[in-house]
Amino acid sequence: MKFTQTNLEGVLVVEPAVFGDHRGWFMETYSEAKFQQQGLKLQFVQDNQSFSAAKGTLRGLHFQTDPKAQTKLVRCTQGAIFDVAVDIRRGSPTYGQWFGIELTAENKKQLLIPKGFAHGFMTLTEDVEVQYKCDELYAPECDGGILWNDPEIGVEWPMDIQPVLSAKDEQAPLLKDSKHNFVY
């Protein structure tokens, strides 16, 4: 398992070792021991899976506030996505900056997004499945979001189209107006 630090402190690209032969392939998607070797002491308590039928579906930018903030380990198991993490920790040297990566069923890469970051993704193909582990249970009273195209953040989404959005995501506030309690 390979861990690569991104331009955002704590946001890591995780690449599992894939072992294949004439039958197919095998990989570990998570190993507590290997994560602990990286100084990551996480206890995942919930696994989530989403399906998006249409290419250009955008989910995000989402987060949960303290005391129910979540670290997520995200992977795409069918199709392809452009996955994004945004630093929303006030006082951080990278506050409002983002990192994006293509996660696909083929490349098997994962993105670790710690507490204090918003998360979102755009589907690059039809019929996309995304799975992610969380270290905190879903808490609707702590649910928050930021507008996907907030100009202050300036995420460069890979498709120049009007994405397929939920009503919640269409009405999300700008970063400057969002109600989050993360401090660097």
Image: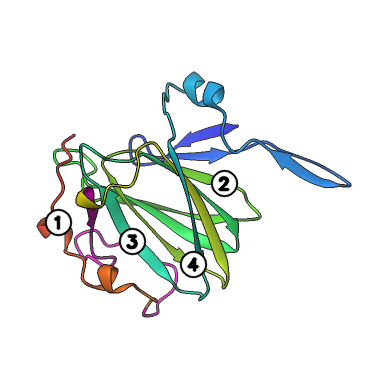
Classify residue 175 as left or right of residue 57: left
Q: Which mark is residue 109?
A: 2
In the image, 101 versus 143, the foreground residue is: 143
Q: How is the image coloured?
A: rainbow
Q: Is residue 156 visible?
A: no
- Marked residue nearer the N-terminal end (3 or 1): 3
The answer to whether the residues at label 3 and label 2 have Cβ atoms under 8 Å apart is no
Q: Amino acid at mark 4?
A: Thr
Span highlighted in magenta in the image: 142-162
Given this view, does label 2 or label 1 mark the residue nearer the observer?
1
Q: Secondary structure at mark 4?
A: strand
Q: What is the spatial separation of the Cα atoms under label 2 and label 1, in whole angstroms?
A: 30 Å
Classify residue 51 as left or right of residue 72: right
Residue 17 drawn at (x, y percent): 67, 36
Farthest-out residue, right: 22
Count neighbours of disc 4 (C-alpha within 10 A) and say few if under 14, some if 14 to 19, many if 20 or more: many
Write the residue at 35% across / 42% down. 137
Q: Which residue is mark 3?
A: 60
- Marked residue nearer the N-terminal end (4 or 3): 3
Count neighbours of disc 2 (C-alpha within 10 A) and say few if under 14, some if 14 to 19, many if 20 or more: many
Count neighbours of disc 3 (C-alpha within 10 A) and say few if under 14, some if 14 to 19, many if 20 or more: many
